[in-house]
Image (tube, helix red, strand yellow):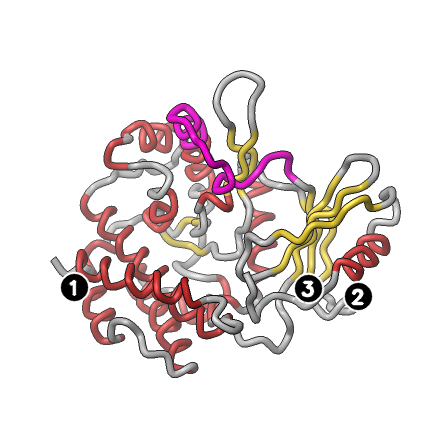
Amino acid sequence: MNSKTKANVTEAQVKDLIKKVMPQKPGISAVYCLNGGMFNISYKLEFIDQSAVVIKIGTPRDVELLSYEKQMMSTELKIHHLIEHKTTVPLPRILYIDQSRQMIPYEFFIMESLEGKPLNEIETKSTEDIHSIGKELARSMAEIHQIKGAFYGYEIMKDDLMGKSYYQAFCHMVDRVIYDGNRKNVQLPISPEKIRDIIQNHQRVFENCGDPVLVHFDLWEGNLFVKSSKKGPLQLEALIDFERGFFGDPAAEIIHISGLINLDDSPWFFQEYNRHASTPLKWDRKTQTRSKIFWMYLLLICYVECFYRDVNGSFEDQKQWSSQELLKVVQVLNR
């Protein structure tokens, strides 16, 4: 998707860059722009020896970003490092990092290319596939959630979040998105006052959530790489894209995976999660409500970011969809 946040680089520039930083590699046989992302731009490069890498290129220096998006690549690399060294969660290995903006006017890093595909590109998924991927995803989530933080919320907002309760930190996160909307004179589908009232009315669901733990907060199907097995169902190959992570509670993770797994009818998912979790997750009313509140927060982001990224209507569909979904979840939370 065309976005103002994507770097303006050509395939020829990417080829030259790879040759400079990875001179030991053989000749490049093919270059593909990966169009799945909406924030950064990525290219896959294949070499004549059948090996491949992916280069992820950050945003232009002068592009306007949402508050939580600042230093996004640094956030992604930090979280990637934490998960790589503190868990057994499968993820692509990073091969090279350059945040100097000297070789090109953008930050970038290079990682190994995965064998499989994003789950959203798999047209037909059997019940066995979903169960296999879901069990591995539950284990991976449980391991990530064992990484504890010193505060609730985003690393970029650390100075404002230290010492705040979960509820206070979440309110600050929401206020920053509202502030970002105000900077662009965005007319939200629901007033900021109503959003704050809904969160205040559900303040109690943020009590007794335990210590802040790392959450990926972007585990939709496009960030789950899967591959075929010689015998049996699809397997989870790796998780990718950690830049939206923050410290919260596991309920913030549920909103993405509920599109893949019907959690109300899948007790096996929580059973598998709790087998590996340091703190069991109960799919009770409080957790379900927090999940819906985080869904409201994500939809608010999805709506506001359109006004920062849109190029000639490229985000019009997202704007309409997020507006409709935001009104739906607000109606649910108001019951």
Q: Which mark is residue 107?
A: 3
Mark 1 sits on what residue?
A: 201
Q: Distance from label 3 to label 1 (Cα)?
A: 42 Å
Instruction: Tell me, yes or no, whether the highlighted magenta stretch contains residue 127.
Output: yes
Secondary structure of residue under mark 1: helix
Q: Residue at x 83, y 38 (%)?
A: 48
Comparing 276 with 36, the one in front is 36
Looking at the rendering, the stretch of residues picked out in magenta corresponds to 114-135
Q: Residue at x 72, y 65 (%)?
A: 9
Quadrant in the rendering for residue 92: top right
- x, y percentage for residue 181? 39, 77
Type of amino acid under label 2: Met
Q: If the image is split into quadrants, where does the N terminus sit?
A: bottom right
Mark 2 sits on what residue?
A: 103
Mark 1 crowd level (few <14, some 14–19, many ≥20, 10 Å Cα)? few
Q: Distance from label 2 to label 3 (Cα)?
A: 9 Å
